Amino acid sequence: MGNIVLDRNNRLEGRLIVITGAAGGIGAEVARQAVAEGARVIVSDVREKDGRALAVELGTNARFIQHDVTSEQEWSDMAQTCLAEGGVHGLVNNAGIYDPRLIVDTDAAFFERNMRINQLGTFLGIRFVEQAAAPPGASIVNASSLAGLRGTKGIAYTATKWAVRGMTKTAAVELAPRNIRANSIHPAFIDTPMLAVMAREHFEARAKSIPLGRAGTADDVTRLVLFLLSDESAFITGAEIAIDGGLAAS
Ligand SMILES: NC(=O)c1ccc[n+]([C@@H]2O[C@H](COP(=O)([O-])OP(=O)(O)OC[C@H]3O[C@@H](n4cnc5c(N)ncnc54)[C@H](O)[C@@H]3O)[C@@H](O)[C@H]2O)c1
C-alpha cells in the first residue's frame, strides 16, 4: 500500500464525539484521528487501563469514561455528562465481542451475551443520542460487519450484526426530520486484537484471498468513520458501507 497523507481539515472542530469500545483496535484509532480533526472525544470502554492510557496520550481534548454499553444507567450518566457540555455531536457504536461458535456450540447464555453487547449496546447508544441533546447535523456510526451482510460462521455474532444493520435504518428514518444521520459500516478482516481468535497463519492466508489482497487496518476503517461523522457525508443516511477489500462483492 502506498503512503497516503491525510489532509487535516479540522472536520470535527469543537464537536463532542463519544466512541464506545475505544480502549483499543478500531475505536482507539478513531479517537486519535477525531482529536486530530479538532473533536473533543470521550473514550468509552469497560477496559480502564488501556482507555485511560489512550486519553492521556491524546491530551486535553480526550477523556476516558469507564462504561459498559449494556448498562442503561451508565448510558444515562453519559447523557448527563454530554448535556452538561451542550450536547453530543457524534456517536460511534463500536464496542463489540467476536467469538464465532458453531450452532451446536451456541447456548442461550452465549447468544444472549452477544445480543446484550453488540445489539442492545448499540440500541442504547442510539437512544442516548436523543437523550444527550444531539443538535441537527449530529451523526451516528454503527459498527456492523461483513457478518451483517451475509451468512457467516458464528450464528450469535451474525444475528447481532444483522440487527445493527436493521436498527441503523430505523434510526436513520426516525431521526432524519431532525437532521441526525445514522449509517452502518461493514468491516471484514481488519487487523485488530479482535481477530486474535484466529491463528496468525490462518489470518494471513485468508487475507491473501481478499480481492484487494491484504487485511484491512484500523486506519482504513477510521477514514470512513471520520467521513461519516463529518459534514462531508451530509446527504448520506441509512447507508450500509462495506469496508472489506471487496469481500462482500465477491
Ligand atoms: N476487526 C475486524 O475485522 C472487524 C470486522 C467486522 C466488524 N468489526 C467490528 O468493529 C468493532 C470494533 O472491533 P475491533 O476489531 O476494534 O475489536 P477490539 O476487540 O479491538 O475492540 C472492541 C472493544 O470493545 C470493548 N468492549 C467489549 N465489551 C464491551 C462492553 N460491554 N462495553 C464497552 N466496551 C466493550 C472491548 O474492551 C474492546 O476494547 C466491533 O463492533 C466489531 O464487531 C471488526
Image (cartoon, helix red, strand yellow):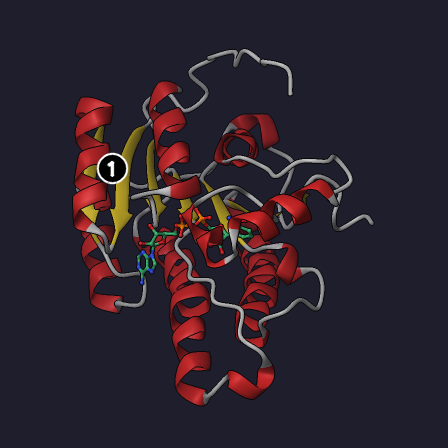
Total marks drawn? Answer: 1
Asked if residue 65 lies left or right of residue 116, the reply is: left
Q: Nearer the viewer, residue 41 or 117?
A: 117
- What SS does tag 1 mark? loop
The residue under the point 74% across, 48% down is: 247
Q: Nearer the viewer, residue 27 or 130?
A: 27
Q: Nearer the viewer, residue 66 or 188?
A: 188
The residue under the point 18% across, 35% down is: 53
Q: Position of residue 142 (x, y in %)?
A: 50, 51
- Indicate the quadrant containing the N terminus: top left, top right, bottom left or bottom right: top right
Q: Which residue is mark 1?
A: 86
Examine the image and state in which quarter residue 55 appears. Answer: top left
Q: Position of residue 15 (x, y in %)?
A: 34, 29
The residue under the point 63% across, 50% down is: 238
Question: Disc 1 residue type?
Answer: Gly
Q: Is residue 177 visible?
A: yes
The residue under the point 44% across, 41% down is: 26
Task: Tell me the crowding category of disc 1: few under 14, some 14 to 19, or many 20 or more residues within 10 angstroms, Cα based.
Answer: some
Asked if residue 227 lies left or right of residue 120, the reply is: right
In the rendered image, the vertical position of residue 192 relative to residue 1, given as above or below: below
Asked if residue 92 lies left or right of residue 16, the reply is: right
Q: Within 8 Å of ligand 1, the CB of disc 1?
A: no
Examine the image and state in which quarter residue 82 appears. Answer: top left
Q: Residue furthest right?
A: 250
In the rendered image, the vertical position of residue 120 relative to residue 226, given as above or below: below
Q: Is residue 240 visible?
A: no
Q: Position of residue 89 (x, y in %)?
A: 38, 37
Q: Position of residue 231 (x, y in %)?
A: 53, 27
